[in-house]
Every structure is written in structure tokens, then in C-alpha cells.
Image: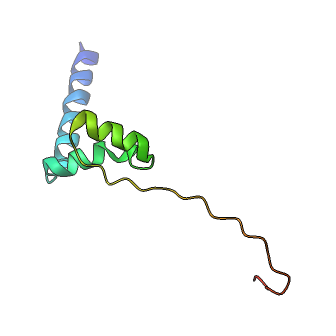
Amino acid sequence: MIEIALNCAAVISLYCAISWCLKHKTQSDIDEASLIPFADDPEVARRVERATGKKINAVQMSEPQSRKPDRYTLEL
């Protein structure tokens, strides 16, 4: 019986803690946070935008261009 009461108290405490953390968040904040995992891949971001209709601020990661070092250039 005590185990059931402790389990119920744990679930209620978890619910209250999550509710308190999300109390000051707007719906747009929550939507933006849910789309963060797709922001680093532009193609996936476009597919998710088409599927959900929500705008994703995708960041395109460009690879650094490898440059042949000049003979007279000193890199520190």
C-alpha cells in the first residue's frame, strides 16, 4: 500500500515540476524547441516544413574549404 502511495506521489511531483518549468513558455517557444533537432540538416528541415507547415530556421553547415598553403604564408 505504501508503494502505491509513493508511486502516486512521484508521478504527481513529476507532473507538477514539468508544469512549473513550462509555465512561462508560449506555444511558439515550445514549437520552436520541438523543431531544433531538424535545424542542422537543410534537406530534412525542408521536408519537415512541408509536412508540418511550420517555419524552421535551418543552419547550413558548410565545410571549410581546404586551401593549399602558400610557400610564403605563415600560419600561427
Residue at the outermost right position: 71
Q: Is residue 65 shown above or below 12?
A: below
- The color scheme shown is rainbow
Residue 56 or residue 26, whichever sits in front: 56
Where does the image place residue 22, in percent across and percent down from the top left? Answer: 19, 47
- Which quadrant holds residue 3? top left
The residue drawn where x is 86% and y is 82% is 71
Residue 62 x %, y %: 54, 59
Q: Position of residue 41 (x, y in %)?
A: 45, 46
Above or below: residue 10 compared with residue 58: above
Q: In what quadrant of the picture does the C terminus appear?
A: bottom right
* Viewer-proximal residue among 72 and 13: 72
Q: Residue at x 21, y 20 (%)?
A: 5
Name the residue located 26 percent from the left edge and 22 percent from the top edge. 7
Tell me the quarter of the image containing the N terminus. Answer: top left
Residue sitting at x 34%, y 37%: 47
Nearer to the camera, 75 or 42 = 42
Task: Reply above or below: 71 against 61.
Answer: below
Direction from residue 5 to residue 46 in the image, left or right: right
Q: Position of residue 14 (x, y in %)?
A: 24, 35
In this picture, is 72 found above or below 41? Answer: below
Q: How many marks?
A: 0
